[in-house]
Image (cartoon, rainbow, N blue to C red):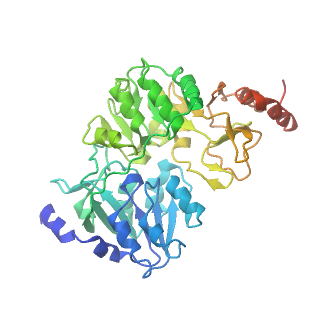
Amino acid sequence: MSVYDLYKQKLVSADEAVKCVKSGDWVEYGFCICGPVDLDHALAKRKDELKDVKIRAGVTAYVPQVMKADPKGETFIWNSVHFSGVDRKISGEGRGWFLPMKYSELPRYVRENNVTNVFMVQVCPMDKHGYFNFSVSISHHYAVVEAIKKFGGKVIVEVNEKLPRVRGGFEECVHISQVDYIVEGSNTHPTQIPSIVATDVDKAVAKLVVEQLRDGDCIQLGIGGMPNAIGSMIAESDLKDLGVHTEMFVDAYVDMYNAGRITGAKKNFDKGRMVYAFAGGTDKTYEFLDENPVAAGAPVDYTNHPAVAEKLDNLVSINNAVEIDLYGQVGAESAGIKQISGTGGQLDFVQAAYASKGGRSFICMSSTFTDKQGNLKSRIIPTLSPGTIVTDPRTATHIVVTEYGMVNLKGKTTWERAEALIGIAHPELRDGLIEDAKKMGIWRR
């Protein structure tokens, strides 16, 4: 049977496809912008027929219809491996939960630990060889396909002609023989995730970091205004032959490439290619990645695993933090018990960059924030706020940057760390931190 005959045989409506979902099932939604649309709407219609349907997703790009249809969370239980603003909102309403993970380990979780009964994902149209491209969300999708048959599950692809078709290293496609149902979707435009506008503080921190970069460095940028500011400054610099090996591909990489800063010529492997696990940006990014051989999408256990990434010379990891304590513990994913984002790949790249020959890891943050009462608060604090999750242990933290300077914590004692971090805190708040450090027995000066 030809792949086109198979296609006709497996082609169904969204309403027909979601009939395979049963009460008690675990349903995996495609990651980020490749979450299902028509299938999501069809599943939402079944709210009164089902109960205890647990949905697993990540970096959710739009409010899912199943959550709109079930405002009390009586049928659909939302679970996310990495919170976006949408995931935070659902969680804040008491209808969603977080799945802690190191992102590099997610494919293994899927294969060994996570039951999945139904997988729903947006894909590109089938090619002549019978393959559906996962578009800009390679991530852990192939691992889900491989694992789902263990549980007698179903793979449903929702074809979207407007998704960019990406080049890859491996596991960027699924063959029609591995698919149970095909739904031709309504071809919604890929969700736009614009860059966060950088503040003056972001730009001040970015300037300090960019001054430390060298020709031939291989760049990993996290998400947020500060990494975006760094990308913009790199584009305007005279740096050359930069490489890319990252978790998330964003608009800033397109700007750096178009400015001639990125060639990948100095990479030890994947030479000349910008490697990433998933992308989220505007049409600038999606149009750039479409059929572009300079970029390679790959599964996250390749892009993020420290054992792989650390083999790249001069790997530079640049990420954000919510707060850091005087011991060097970094909280980058929660404010107290409130989950904001997730560990994602931050710890993976902090470890990999330090292990890389010539590599450096930068944790960037503004020195202060203003609370709801209008009070100036330090992000450098004696100990992490109660309930705050440690994203990077103090033993892993390398270089910390605020608008007041940067410090390298490697090799420093507890009192040296306290002195160094207080030195880059807001000047008006340093005396209070010194008193705290004295009480904690980590102040000598």
User: Who is closer to the viewer here, 269 or 278?
Assistant: 278
Residue 96 versus residue 366 in the image, above or below: below
Q: How far across and down, in percent of the image, does residue 397 sit? A: 63, 35
Count of residue discs: 0
Q: Residue pushed farthest top? A: 238
Q: Quadrant of the N terminus?
A: bottom left
Residue 422 versus residue 371 in the image, above or below: above
Residue 305 falls left or right of residue 263: right
**Residue occupying the point 48% across, 34% down:** 228
User: Who is closer to the viewer here, 337 or 22?
Assistant: 337
Residue 377 falls left or right of residue 84: right
Residue 156 versus residue 296 in the image, above or below: below
Q: Residue pushed farthest front? A: 374
Residue 209 at least partly seen: yes
Q: Quadrant of the C terminus?
A: top right
Q: How far across and down, in percent of the image, does residue 258 sit? A: 33, 28
User: Who is closer to the viewer here, 292 or 378?
Assistant: 378
Q: How far across and down, in percent of the image, does residue 299 sit? A: 38, 48
User: Who is closer to the viewer here, 283 or 400?
Assistant: 283
**Residue occupying the point 44% across, 81% down:** 48
**Residue occupying the point 45% across, 79% down:** 23
